[in-house]
């Protein structure tokens, strides 16, 4: 797992963003464990959908995570 300071340096989503996204996804009825086809509407590629939700969120940049937060609000 990437630490917050490492994630910030690389421009990846912060742990705070990831946790908030997990909350928003659960609130909207999305799975918070495994990806499925419903994540396509959120911009996840077919390859990304073969992994876990947390894995996908950890691969997002801070800007992508921020845009996804805005989309789910």
Image: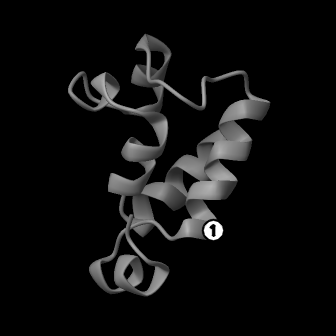
Q: Quadrant of the C terminus?
A: top right
Report the side of 23 relative to 53 (left or right): right
* Residue at 63% in and 23% down: 30
Query: Farthest right residue?
Result: 27
x, y percent for residue 31: 60, 23
- The mark tally for this picture is 1
Among the 4 quarters of the image, the one containing residue 44: top left
Instruction: Return the residue at label 1.
Output: 16
Badge 1: residue crowd in 10 Å (few <14, some 14–19, many ≥20): few
* Residue at 20% in and 27% down: 47
Query: Farthest left residue?
Result: 47
Q: Is residue 73 visible?
A: no
* Residue at 51% in and 54% down: 67
Among the 4 quarters of the image, the one containing residue 18: bottom right
Report the side of 67 relative to 37 (left or right): right
Q: Quadrant of the N terminus?
A: bottom left
Q: How is the image coloured?
A: one colour
Report the side of 8 relative to 25 (left or right): left
Report the side of 4 relative to 10 (left or right): right
* Residue at 64% in and 44% down: 22
Q: Is residue 32 visible?
A: yes
Q: Is residue 62 above or below residue 70?
A: below
Query: Farthest front residue?
Result: 1
x, y percent for residue 35: 44, 23
Q: Which element type, helix, strand or loop, lies under badge 1? A: helix
x, y percent for residue 6: 35, 83
Q: Is residue 11 above or below residue 30?
A: below
x, y percent for residue 63: 43, 65
Among the 4 quarters of the image, the one containing residue 3: bottom left
């Amino acid at each position: 797992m990437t630490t917050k300071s490492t994630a910030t340096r690389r421009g990846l989503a912060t742990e705070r963003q990831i946790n908030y996204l997990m909350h928003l996804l659960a609130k909207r009825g999305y799975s918070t464990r495994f990806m499925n086809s419903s994540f396509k509407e959120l911009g996840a590629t077919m390859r990304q959908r073969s992994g876990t939700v947390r894995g996908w969120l950890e691969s997002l940049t801070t800007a992508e995570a921020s845009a996804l937060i805005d989309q789910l609000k």
